[in-house]
Amino acid sequence: MNEMTLTQPAFADEAAASRATAVVSAATAVQKTAPAARAAAVQDTLKMPVLLSGWAARSATNGIDTARLFAFGMDMQTWSELAQMQQAIVERLTLQQQSWLQGWAAWTRERAEIRGANTMTKLVEQEFNLIAQIGQLLIDQTTNLVALQENIEVSYAYWLNQKLGALSSTAGVQTPVAAVVRA
């Protein structure tokens, strides 16, 4: 019995020491990766103005070329092509809205089907799973809308470039729009 008493605390001390070593090791790993994470955050922050200025330049170029197109007159073919572009945009938005609503319908079904949790652990797990699903719905919808916007801008710039030819702001110039359009 005396041996058992002496052995158990030693084993407990070893287990505690092992856990403490694991925690220190994990904390050290976090400390080592923190500067890289900080640098990545700074780099991402610096990307935003570059991306926004590219968007602004694309929008300005599209605006200038649209004014040129109107200034030189628009025939029925041009009006028809614009109407077709708008119809395509409405169809894409309708599909995105349908997907958004289907996602919410699935979420509400899952919310309604959740069985009563019998432990706090299960309750927390279920609730955070639902919150994560909401986050994913928001991410998907926002990403899809931004992707559609970018697609419209680039496609419209290409169309303007085709319509205006040498009169286009991007004809023979390597702007962000021209680089994308000509690629």
Image (spheres, helix red, strand yellow):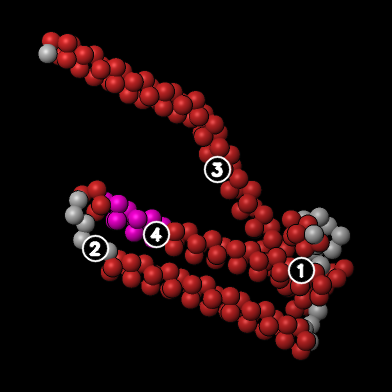
Going from the N terminus, do you reach mark 3 or mark 4 first? 3
Identify the residue under disc 4: 133
Q: Which residue is mark 1?
A: 158
- In this rendering, does residue 60 appear at all? no
Could you classify mark 4 by the number of other residues whose Cα lies within 10 Å: few (under 14), some (14-19), or many (20 or more)? some
User: Residue flagged by tag 3: what amino acid is it?
Assistant: Thr
Q: Earlier in the sequence, mark 2 or mark 3?
A: 3
Residue kind at label 2, given as amino acid type = Arg
Residue shown at 60% from the left, 67% from the top: 148
**Picture quarter containing residue 6?**
top left
Q: Nearer the viewer, mark 4 or mark 1?
A: 4
Query: Nearer the observer, disc 4 or disc 2?
Result: 2
Labelled pair 4, 2 in contact (Cβ < 8 Å):
no
Q: Considering the numbered disc 3 on the image, is that residue within a helix, a strand or a loop?
A: helix
Q: Is residue 101 left or right of residue 50?
A: left
The amino acid on which the numbered mark 4 sits, given as a three-letter code, is Gln
Q: Quadrant of the C terminus?
A: bottom right
Image quadrant of residue 149?
bottom right
Give the Cα distance between marks 3 and 1: 30 Å
Which residues, given as a range, are shown in magenta?
Answer: 124-135
For label 2, the residue is: 115
Kindly state the secondary structure of the residue where label 4 is placed: helix
